[in-house]
Amino acid sequence: MPSIIYNDRPRKRNGGFSTAELDPATFFKTHATNYYQLRALYNSTTDYNEKYQANAEMAIAERKMAYWRNHPDFTTTHEMDIISELKKRGVNTLTKPPENS
C-alpha cells in the first residue's frame, strides 16, 4: 500500500544537519497535525490495509513529535498551545487535502 503521509522506507543518511536554529514548535505542529489526521483515518476506515498503513505512519509521527519535544527550545507550553489550537481547528477529524493548482 502506498504511503498516506510519511514514506516508511529507510532513508539514506547524507550527513547530519543542525536543528539548533530551527523552530521546534513549527515542526512539532506539522507532525502533530499529521498524527491527528492519521488517527482520524485509522478510526474511520474499514479497509484493513489503510488501517495498517495509518497505524504505521502514526508511529512515525509520534517518533518525530518526540524528537522535537526533546529540542532544547521546546517547552510543554508550546505543546499545550499547539494541541489546543489543533483541537479548536478540528484537525482530529478528516480533512480534504488541498487541490493542486
Image (spheres, rainbow, N blue to C red):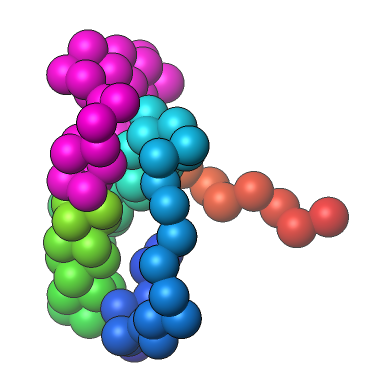
- Position of the N terminus, as image quadrant, is bottom left
- Position of the C terminus, as image quadrant, is bottom right
Query: Residue 58 is drawn in which quadrant?
Result: bottom left
Query: Residue 33 is drawn in which quadrant?
Result: top left
- Tell me if residue 76 is in the magenta stretch: yes
Query: Residue 11 is drawn in which quadrant?
Result: bottom left
- Tell me if residue 20 is in the magenta stretch: no
Name the residue rendered at 17%, 39% in the picture.
70
Name the residue rendered at 75%, 58% in the picture.
100
Name the residue rendered at 48%, 37% in the picture.
21
Please name the predominant secondary structure of the magenta segment in the image: helix
Residue 39: percent from left, percent from top: 21, 50
Residue 46: percent from left, percent from top: 19, 67
Q: Nearer the viewer, residue 93 or 76?
A: 76
Name the residue rendered at 53%, 47% in the picture.
96
**Visible residue check, residue 47:** no
Report how many numbered discs are placed on residues in the image: 0
Residue occupying the far right of the picture: 101
What range of the chain is rendered magenta?
Answer: 65-94
**Visible residue check, residue 30:** yes
Would you say 85 lies left or right of 99 here? Answer: left
Q: Nearer the viewer, residue 19 or 49?
A: 19
Would you say 71 lies left or right of 86 here? Answer: left
Residue 84's place in the image compared with 46, above or below, is above
Q: Nearer the viewer, residue 99 or 58?
A: 58
Residue 23: percent from left, percent from top: 45, 32
Residue 67: percent from left, percent from top: 22, 48
